[in-house]
Image (spheres, rainbow, N blue to C red):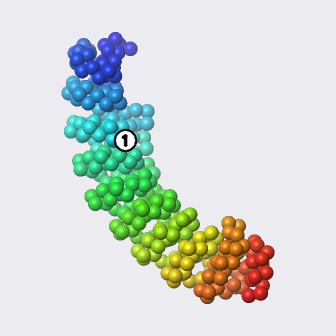
């Protein structure tokens, strides 16, 4: 390495302003000068030397250099709370708010993924585009949801982000909150107009389907129903949320769903009832299945209705005591 460049980097590392100014003065004027200053610029940000950072920028340091993942300094400055002063300086100097790394992420994607709330606030206030999409089609709202940050989602929505934006997998933020069991995020999105009945993926399941497959998902199920989720929505195979729920140890959610008017008599596209799904589950005990059956029968389900293949629930029940109980109904 050129001794002058080595002195520059050493001064940047130490945060020695006087030595840095001397090294800048000794640096050769040439095509590599801006890049040499730019590399020193990255060092000063990493070491939190704000004054040195400013001097390097004033001396013509290139701030658009990329690392091996395509991140520019403005991406790196958007990651951490300690880098926010550097982010502010970069924005003042004209760094692009829409710079993309190798994953097509903008600085706002990075800030929302952190999450780094001050960086996100600064970027939004400076005019960063809220609907820019990364390589996976995720917007900043998707990233904030994946970071489980209600505060960031509120900030984005207050500034015009769309709650129904879809990524490349047709996933909306509400769907991500559901499958990740981020219930506070989900309830907030519902309160801001996210539509609960939209099908969320190629399975054609709604958010209520996914909520019924959650562990401890009762609050989310209640919120979805409160905001208008349809209890009898069908997925690609004709299964309703009740069909999904009857295969799990979730008796409290079962009461909520039936109380909201879920139809216990609906069959899926193979003619299987909620009773059929309940007694063929390997995830539930015989005791739980007995309680589920009682609830379904009280709600009007026929415990002996065969599926389209001619099999009755008692023919396929996984627990012998349930087979016997169904025979004597």
In this rendering, the answer to whether 226 lies above or below 172 is: below
Left-right relation of 261 to 59 = right
Q: Quadrant of residue 212?
A: bottom right
Q: Which residue is mark 1?
A: 79
Residue 37 x %, y %: 29, 23
Q: Work out whether 264 lies above or below 59.
A: below
Give the residue at x 59% y 83%: 264
> From this viewpoint, is residue 314 visible?
yes
- Left or right of residue 90: residue 267: right
Q: Position of residue 242 (x, y in %)?
A: 58, 76
Circle 1 SS class: loop
Return the residue found at the far top: 3
Q: Residue shown at 72%/85% (left/top)?
A: 304
Q: Residue at x 36, y 53 (%)?
A: 140
Dividing the picture into quarters, in which one does residue 54 lie? top left
The N terminus, quarter of image: top left
Callout 1 environment at 10 Å: few (<14), some (14 to 19), or many (20+)?
many
Q: Which corner quadrant of the image does residue 326 belong to?
A: bottom right
Q: Is residue 278 left or right of residue 322?
A: left
């Amino acid at each position: 390495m050129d001794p002058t460049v080595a002195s520059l980097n050493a001064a940047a590392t130490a945060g020695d302003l006087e030595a840095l100014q001397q090294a800048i003065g000794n640096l050769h004027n040439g095509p590599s000068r801006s890049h040499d200053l730019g590399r020193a610029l990255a060092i000063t940000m990493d070491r939190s030397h704000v004054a040195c950072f400013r001097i390097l920028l004033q001396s013509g340091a290139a701030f658009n250099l990329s690392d091996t993942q395509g991140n520019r300094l403005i991406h790196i400055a958007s990651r951490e709370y300690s880098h926010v002063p550097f982010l502010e300086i970069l924005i003042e100097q004209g760094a692009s708010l829409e710079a993309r790394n190798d994953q097509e992420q903008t600085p706002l994607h990075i800030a929302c993924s952190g999450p780094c709330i001050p960086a996100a606030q600064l970027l939004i206030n400076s005019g960063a585009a809220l609907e820019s999409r990364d390589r996976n089609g995720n917007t900043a709202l998707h990233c904030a949801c994946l970071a489980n940050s209600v505060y960031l989602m509120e900030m984005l929505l207050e500034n015009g982000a769309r709650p129904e934006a879809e990524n490349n997998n047709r996933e909306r933020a509400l769907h991500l909150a559901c499958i990740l069991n981020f219930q506070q995020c989900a309830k907030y999105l519902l309160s801001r107009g996210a539509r609960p009945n939209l099908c969320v993926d190629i399975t054609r399941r709604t958010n209520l389907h996914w909520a019924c497959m959650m562990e401890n998902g009762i609050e989310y199920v209640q919120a979805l129903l409160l905001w208008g989720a349809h209890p009898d929505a069908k997925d690609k195979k004709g299964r309703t949320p009740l069909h999904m729920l009857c295969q799990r140890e979730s008796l409290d959610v079962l009461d909520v769903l039936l109380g909201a008017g879920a139809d216990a008599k609906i069959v899926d596209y193979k003619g299987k009832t909620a009773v059929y799904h309940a007694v063929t589950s390997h995830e539930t005990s015989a005791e739980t299945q007995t309680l589920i059956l009682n609830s379904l029968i009280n709600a009007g389900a026929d415990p002996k209705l065969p599926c389209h293949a001619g099999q009755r629930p008692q023919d396929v029940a996984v627990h012998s005591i349930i087979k016997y109980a169904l025979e004597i109904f």
